Amino acid sequence: MSVSRRQLLWLGAAGAAGTAGCSPALVRHAGAERPRFDMGIASGQPHAAGMVLWTRLTGADLPDQVPVQWELAEDDAFRRVVARGTETAVAADAHSVHAEPAGLQPAREYWYRFMALGQRSAAGRTRTAPAAGADVKRFDFAITSCQRWDVGHYAAWRDAAAQDLDAVLFLGDYIYEYASGPGAVRPTHTTGKVRTLADYRHRYALHKSDPHLQAAHAAAPWLVVWDDHEVDNDYADVQGQDLQPNFAEQRAAAYRAYWEHLPLPKAARPVDGRMRIYGALDWGRLARILLLDDRQYRSPQACPRPGKGGSHTVRAAQCAELADPRRTLLGRAQEDWLAQSWSTDRPWNLLAQQTLMARLNWRSPADGGPEHGTDGWDGYAPARKRLLDVVAQKKLPGAVVLGGDVHANYVGSLKADFDRPDSATVASEFCGTSISSLGGPQARAARALALNPHLLHGRADERGYVRFTLQPHQLQAELRVVADARQPDSAVGAGARFVVEAGRPGPVRV
Ligand code: FE
Ligand code: CA
């Protein structure tokens, strides 16, 4: 061993200054025979006085209970430590740690790290949200989703980690439950579809072994919501896509593993197979961030294939259920909560949810259309109308819907009536593409653009994420596009750019 562990750890801490492309989380503990922080560290759910600090200890030889110290400092060298504590990592929670420093200063950068079993983790950078009443001039954030492990690498995360972001919004599909097929870029370790708690934990550990993902976690606090693949493709409430028996048990295991592996507070730990992930956070006077859950409470998808659950693509004329106003994507309680939770005295409301909200018609009326996918908002059009009617009634000046799920970049306007392109634009939408998951054929997306004039941009062939700068008068968005997601060292560059002016809903390409 040419370099002592102490030196490596020191390098790790010094590297936490945030040097672009060289994250502290990449520094492995070469001196440790059994590395204890191999899944990296993370922070999340920032608020004005604190956030959650996360890690999960690694090693097959861990005792049932392990004390884990954490410390949080105002500087990357940890000379000014302002909070420290001890958590007990227990086997029942997969030795995950969810530490919650409190009483911190608002709108401030901090650095954190963990110590356990004689080892120290790399250091991560995090920050608190501004105080709810604070004037905030600028908020830099990214929306990301869909990081299927076996079909691509995480060059997008390498690029995101090097951006100076106040927060990362992860909008679902953190893991995929599938087995690897032929032609995988990097195969999964487990052979079949994941079903059990042990399977889910293993799948998270696999994703979290990626150095670029670890770097993105170590660079900024995340706000997270799930979509379907954290449990099972296209599930709805307690119905799996294969109508499999015992799906409620599978979902409970998946929710538990989700909580174990993400920087979520102790209070979010699932109870009786349920877990609340929706909520709101104010970024000072600038914006309210509303986080939704489109899976746990939804009505089953309309007009499924015979003997199946899950999604389908159907002609509207052949599926009367699509127009049934009793069907819900959010569930009644969350729908009511959202209607009450919009901020009417901030320039911006950011609705962070899972999927494309704009109508996406795949077939012209002359050809028997319209035709829609049933898993997204098109499958719940009356519920979408209820949501957008509230935004219109409240005359919100800057409602921006953020999404993922569809593995394509869609940018457009949300209309009072999608059948009338000249009707009022109620909100702006940025549905970001996948980090790595494969998209559909671009020719199909290009044809759909002609049928959906409220969409400005539709690119199923782009991988990456969307980077935003929000200011009181304007939202700027830049698509960050990966040249080749099969290569971990792929170039990542600027794609299309858009702005939304406060008080004038609808993105404009610049
Ligand atoms: Fe996905
Ligand atoms: Ca999805």
Image (cartoon, helix red, strand yellow):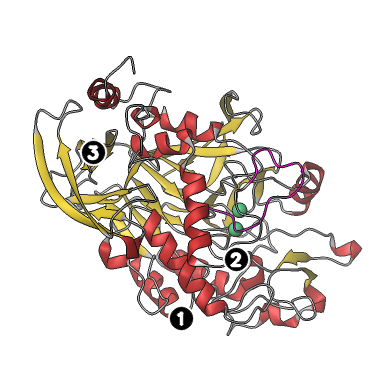
Marks 3 and 1 sit apart, C-alpha to C-alpha, by 41 Å
Identify residue type, mark 1: Arg
- 23 vs 323: above or below: above
Quarter of the picture containing the N terminus is top left
User: Can I make out residue 174 in this image?
Assistant: no
- Residue 232 is tagged as 2
Percent from the top left, x then y, of residue 362?
78, 58
What range is drawn magenta here?
175-187
- Residue 113 is tagged as 3
Left or right: 345 as drawn, with respect to 181? left
Which secondary structure type mostly characterizes the magenta part of the structure? Answer: loop
Left or right: 407 as drawn, with respect to 361? left
Marks 2 and 3 sit apart, C-alpha to C-alpha, by 33 Å
SS for tag 2? loop
Percent from the top left, x then y, of residue 363?
83, 60
The 10 Å Cα crowd at callout 3, few under 14, some 14 to 19, many 20 or more, is many
Which quarter of the picture shows residue 373? bottom right
State which image quarter holds ligand 2.
bottom right
- Residue 100: within the magenta? no
SS for tag 1? helix
- 102 vs 304: above or below: above
Q: Residue at left 12%, top 45%?
A: 84
Identify residue type, mark 2: Asp
Q: Is mark 1 within 8 Å of ligand 2?
A: no
Quarter of the picture containing the C terminus is top right
Of marks 3 and 1, the one in the foreground: 3
Percent from the top left, x then y, of residue 142?
44, 41
- Residue 332 is tagged as 1
SS for tag 3? strand
- Residue 453 is tagged as none
Q: Residue at left 56%, top 27%?
A: 494
